Image (cartoon, rainbow, N blue to C red):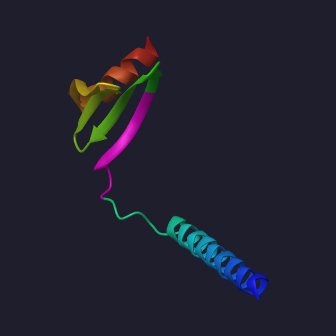
Amino acid sequence: MDDLSLVSYLLKVGLSIALLAVGGYVLVFFHRRRVPLRAKGAVGLLASLSLGRDVIFIVRCGPDVIALLSGKNGGRVIGRWRYEEWIAGVEGTQDG
């Protein structure tokens, strides 16, 4: 009689895990197909550079470009430019 209750318990646990796995798979599968609800050009990652444990992120936030240093001790804004100035600087370095 003990073996029957153990088998039924393991069967219930196995079915529960399988149901959770299928539910998670369906959730991820349908989530990827949705169009992101984001305003065009509001926030975007332009570049990132890993420096050991720290990372520099260049982020476009609306009309501005912001350089952020993120690391173990937190984050810090390194610089801020208008998007037009940033593009002019990038095009200037590629030409010459």
Vertical side of 96 occupied by 84: above or below: below
**Which quarter shows the N terminus?**
bottom right
Q: Is residue 55 left or right of residue 10?
A: left
Vertical side of 49 occupied by 64: above or below: below
**Which quarter shows the C terminus?**
top left
Most foreground residue, 68 or 3: 3
Vertical side of 22 occupied by 5: above or below: below
Q: Residue at x 71, y 85 (%)?
A: 5
State the image coordinates of residue 33 (x, y, percent, origin top left).
53, 68
Instruction: Answer with the quarter of the image where residue 44 lies.
Output: top left
User: What residue occupies the far top of the structure in this picture?
Assistant: 96
Q: Residue at x 35, y 31 (%)?
A: 58
User: What residue occupies the far front of the structure in this picture?
Assistant: 1
Q: Is residue 91 magenta?
A: no
Q: Is residue 84 left or right of residue 93?
A: left
Most foreground residue, 27 or 94: 27
State the image coordinates of residue 54 (x, y, percent, origin top left).
40, 23
Q: Which residues are magenta?
A: 39-48
State the image coordinates of residue 63 (x, y, percent, origin top left).
22, 41
Q: Main secondary structure of the magenta part?
A: strand
Q: Residue at x 24, y 45 (%)?
A: 62
Instruction: Answer with the quarter of the image where residue 48 lies.
Output: top left
Instruction: Answer with the quarter of the image where residue 75 lies.
Output: top left
Most foreground residue, 15 or 95: 15
Q: Residue at x 33, y 60 (%)?
A: 38
Q: Is residue 35 left or right of residue 33?
A: left
State the image coordinates of residue 59 (x, y, percent, origin top left).
32, 36
Tally of numbered tags: 0
